[in-house]
Image (cartoon, grey):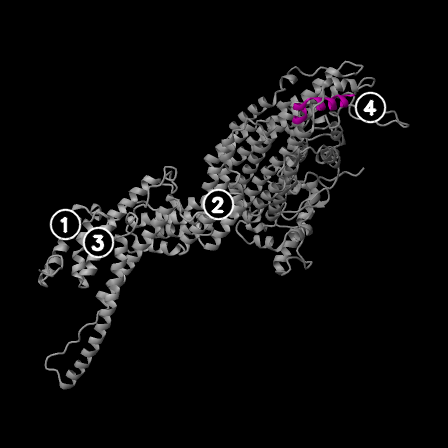
């Protein structure tokens, strides 16, 4: 028999040859990078010659490729032909971005909403959960492809956010996967009574395997605990595909176990080196209390660690295949002893005997495995492998580093202990079973106690990732069936943190699931808190098509509030109309939301210290908000009412230009539309008092603005457009005198035209100012009739008392001002007699304008009237402009 050379010696000549080629290439400066005209592939040296710095590290320092079972694996930065065909051109473009993760999953929210709307009924729950799981799985795979395509030279820190998003979506996928499994069992599987199972088994022996199957049929907690174990193993299998299989190589080119130890023994004629085992049987190193060769110890640790990883992911057959591949068939055989015995020949006799399944001496194997898992001389991962198969929790926990690992360990032991107890109680074996250690049954805990211990271990680990902890809490509550606590934890998280967009989407759909199909003990307020947090995020991102549908799932008061918040973000008329139609399509009260937007835009009713001609952004926002009420004719009354309210605030703040802009936005046919709709609805032509007062107030504001505009035109015409009399300089020449006379004639003509225009402007301005002062039906800014109590119940939001106070303030502010302006127009235009008669107008009982004057304002008006009377006296008229008799 040829002596196998150790891997380090086998690769020595290859190393020398490679270094020689490299030096020769460097000396010749070969442009191709190698003597053969193409880049050299790395040599397939054994694991021993390519060690990383840490012996217990699973990953290898593989620069370009790895070999797993003879298959070339994909490294970061490489793509398979299948992945190249899957990724489309937009996804190829994403790789040029700094962190394309959010963009890659941007459509997930729409897909979730579409799935939710397509399966609204209760009997479609499992299909809906399956859709959620499939959607997240697709996005997880898509992100994984993006990460794998990142060139290696861009560094491991590239796409940090994308990697974090991939991890979070993996957690979400696992959560949906768990919910699918649990809800399918809770909705479709009915536990059978133990007595019925006994009747079914009368007349036929029941093997250990059949006993375990019957236990799962009648014990819901055991069956669902096994579902949890299967779920955790499935999730771990996904992690292996992405984290281990493409990075780890545990064996060399020969299927010889402990080849370096064997080579040392053969070279030394069976005499082991000092401090090294001289036995090659499986128990030799433990029996001799001597270790293997250093390199074999390293390989053994790697093998055992990966065996545990495979066992943790439920891939027992792959673990056995790996043992066979590395020359340890005996270890693969030891992994068969945990299986329950079953002889199918006793149940259904066949023409040919069928093989017996499982291990009839399982109790002996389990006792031996327990002893091995307790022996500290073995590697911790080897002890964990056999501890998982025999139910030794103490051997499992030291190698469990995550929440999922610990939950898997506890539940696997829980299922094992329950199955073992049932098999031993009902076993029909002809021999007496060997007893297990006393503390075996002491490790059996209820699911609630299991999670209490897991939580204690997690706190000691010091992990602070809130999103991961939240998903773990959701999964824990789902396993325990405690949906009320689940919703409470999600609500608390949304209040404190909120998380990113994808996390909030996930929480919202979990809440919708629980609210529709869950326990009646769930606090509705917690569900609303989570949904509201997601709606808030959608509104902040201005995703109107999504926001309106989730807003429709909130209580009516919150629907109006958040729909209004969404509308506030729309500025262009087309965007506003689109948002309004989306809200209507989602079943929201769009008119109420539009009304709320307008009311939120009102300005405080605080008069400014001085008149300001500038319009601020807040003024424009308040004025522009009225457009929300102009899309539907049915809201024209609200448009007038809210327009009046905003105008009152603007006028009280002396924001006349802003009020003018607002009045220009309200269509001129608004009153006609209002009257037509009222007649169409009731058949009457007279509006009710409340609506009639709204119309009158609108007309009052319109009359006031017309008066102000007319006065501005009159002032401009009087002070700026009046022709100036030409002047002749002293000692002017004859030609200059003739030209001056010509200019005088032109001046006289222009002056006549100006006087005619001024007379017309004065008449128009005076008329419009009189319209304000002599406004019919109670006066300017005074209701025609008091509205009934029901109508005064705050149709404007601020309440009727507030409105009446604002109307009174406007009268006190602008009635004296209008009187003074009218007096100025009349006196400057030479209509002194009419100006003097303003005293009768102010003092008259019909309009009682004097009530709106303060004492200083009355004194100021009396002073102006006195000056007017003096000018009349100078014209030989009495103080009121009448001729003396």
Asked whether residue 210 is drawn in magenta, I would say yes
Q: Say if 771 sits above or below 322 in the image.
A: below
Closest to the observer: 674 or 635? Answer: 674
- The span shown in magenta is 207-225
Which badge, 2 or 1, is on the more N-terminal residue?
2
* Callouts 4 and 2 close, C-beta under 8 Å: no
283 sits to left or right of 525: right
Q: Which residue is mark 1?
A: 859
Closest to the observer: 86 or 844? Answer: 844
Q: Which residue is mark 3?
A: 819
Give me the C-alpha separation between circle 3 and circle 2: 44 Å
Q: Is residue 776 visible?
A: yes
Q: Quadrant of the N terminus?
A: top right
Closest to the observer: 66 or 464? Answer: 464
Q: Say if 759 sits above or below 266 in the image.
A: below
Residue 590, numbered label: 2
- Give coordinates of residue 453: x percent, y percent: 56, 23
């Amino acid at each position: 028999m040829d002596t196998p050379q150790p891997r380090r010696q086998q690769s020595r000549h290859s190393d020398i040859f490679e270094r020689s080629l490299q030096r020769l290439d460097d000396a010749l400066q070969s442009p191709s990078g190698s003597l053969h005209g193409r880049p050299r592939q790395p040599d397939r040296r054994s694991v021993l010659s390519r060690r990383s710095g840490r012996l217990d590290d699973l990953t290898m320092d593989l620069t370009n490729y790895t070999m797993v079972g003879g298959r070339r694996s994909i490294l970061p930065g490489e793509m398979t032909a299948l992945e190249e065909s899957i990724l489309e051109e937009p996804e190829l473009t994403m790789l040029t971005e700094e962190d394309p993760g959010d963009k890659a999953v941007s459509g997930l929210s729409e897909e979730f909403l579409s799935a939710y709307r397509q399966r609204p009924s209760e009997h479609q729950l499992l299909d809906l959960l399956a859709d959620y799981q499939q959607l997240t799985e697709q996005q997880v795979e898509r992100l994984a492809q993006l990460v794998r395509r990142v060139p290696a030279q861009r560094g491991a820190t590239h796409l940090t956010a994308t990697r974090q998003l991939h991890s979070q979506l993996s957690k979400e996928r696992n959560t949906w996967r768990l919910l699918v499994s649990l809800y399918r069992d809770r909705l479709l599987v009915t536990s059978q009574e133990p007595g019925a199972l006994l009747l079914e088994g009368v007349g036929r022996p029941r093997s250990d395997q059949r006993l375990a199957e019957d236990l799962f049929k009648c014990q819901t907690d055991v069956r669902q605990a096994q579902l949890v174990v299967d779920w955790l193993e499935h999730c771990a299998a996904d992690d292996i595909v992405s984290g281990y299989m493409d990075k780890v190589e545990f064996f060399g080119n020969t299927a010889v176990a402990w080849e370096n130890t064997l080579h040392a023994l053969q070279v030394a004629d069976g005499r082991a080196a000092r401090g090294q085992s001289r036995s090659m049987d499986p128990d030799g190193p433990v029996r001799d209390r001597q270790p293997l060769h250093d390199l074999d110890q390293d390989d053994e640790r790697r093998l055992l660690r990966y065996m545990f990883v495979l066992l943790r992911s439920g891939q027992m057959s792959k673990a056995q295949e790996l043992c066979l591949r590395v020359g340890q068939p005996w270890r693969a055989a030891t992994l068969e002893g945990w299986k329950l015995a079953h002889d199918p020949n006793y149940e259904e006799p066949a023409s040919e005997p069928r093989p017996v399944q499982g291990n009839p001496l399982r109790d002996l194997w389990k006792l031996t495995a327990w002893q091995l898992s307790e022996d500290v001389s073995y590697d911790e991962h080897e002890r964990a492998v056999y501890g998982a198969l025999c139910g030794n929790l103490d051997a499992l926990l030291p190698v469990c580093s995550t929440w999922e690992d610990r939950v898997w360990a506890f539940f696997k032991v829980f299922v094992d202990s329950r199955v073992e107890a049932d098999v031993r109680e009902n076993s029909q074996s002809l021999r007496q079973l060997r007893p297990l250690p006393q503390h075996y049954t002491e490790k059996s805990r209820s699911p609630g106690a299991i999670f209490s211990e897991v939580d204690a271990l997690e706190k000691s680990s010091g992990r602070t990732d809130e999103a991961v902890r939240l998903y773990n809490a959701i999964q824990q509550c789902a396993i325990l069936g405690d949906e009320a606590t689940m919703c409470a934890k999600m609500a608390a998280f949304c209040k404190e943190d909120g998380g990113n967009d994808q996390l909030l989407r996930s929480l919202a759909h979990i809440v919708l699931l629980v609210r529709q199909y869950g326990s009646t003990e769930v606090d509705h307020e917690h569900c609303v808190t989570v949904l509201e947090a997601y709606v808030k995020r959608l509104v902040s991102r201005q995703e109107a098509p999504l926001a309106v549908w989730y807003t429709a799932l909130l209580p009516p008061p919150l629907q109006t509030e958040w729909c209004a918040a969404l509308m506030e973000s729309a500025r262009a008329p087309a965007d506003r109309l689109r948002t309004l139609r989306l809200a209507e399509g989602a079943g929201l009260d769009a008119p109420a939301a539009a009304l709320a937007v307008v009311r939120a835009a009102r300005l405080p009713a605080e008069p400014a210290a001085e008149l300001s001609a500038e319009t601020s952004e807040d003024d424009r926002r308040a004025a522009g908000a009225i457009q929300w009420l102009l899309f539907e004719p049915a809201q024209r009354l609200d448009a007038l009412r809210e327009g009046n309210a905003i105008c009152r605030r603007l006028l009280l703040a002396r924001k006349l230009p802003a009020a003018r802009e607002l009045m220009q936005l309200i269509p001129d046919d608004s009153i006609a539309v209002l009257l037509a709709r009222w007649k169409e609805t009731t058949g009457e032509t007279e509006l009710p008092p409340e609506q009639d007062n709204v119309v009158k107030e609108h007309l009052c504001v319109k009359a006031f603005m017309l008066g102000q505009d007319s006065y501005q035109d009159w002032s401009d015409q009087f002070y700026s457009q009046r022709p100036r009399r030409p002047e002749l300089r002293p000692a002017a020449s004859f030609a200059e005198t003739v030209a001056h006379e010509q200019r005088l004639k032109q001046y006289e003509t222009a002056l006549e035209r100006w006087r005619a225009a001024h007379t017309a402007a004065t008449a128009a301005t005076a008329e419009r100012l009189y319209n304000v002062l002599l406004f019919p039906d109670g006066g300017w800014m005074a209701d025609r009739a008091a509205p009934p109590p029901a109508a005064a119940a705050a149709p404007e939001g601020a309440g009727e008392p507030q409105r009446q106070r604002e109307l009174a303030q406007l009268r006190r502010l602008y009635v004296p001002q209008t009187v003074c302006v009218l007096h100025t127009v009349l006196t400057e235009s030479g209509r002194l007699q009419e100006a003097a008669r303003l005293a009768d107008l102010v003092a008259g009982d019909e309009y009682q304008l004097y009530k709106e004057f303060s004492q200083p304002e009355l004194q100021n008006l009396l002073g102006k009237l006195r000056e007017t009377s003096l000018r009349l006296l100078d014209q030989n008229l009495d103080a009121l402009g009448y001729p003396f008799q």
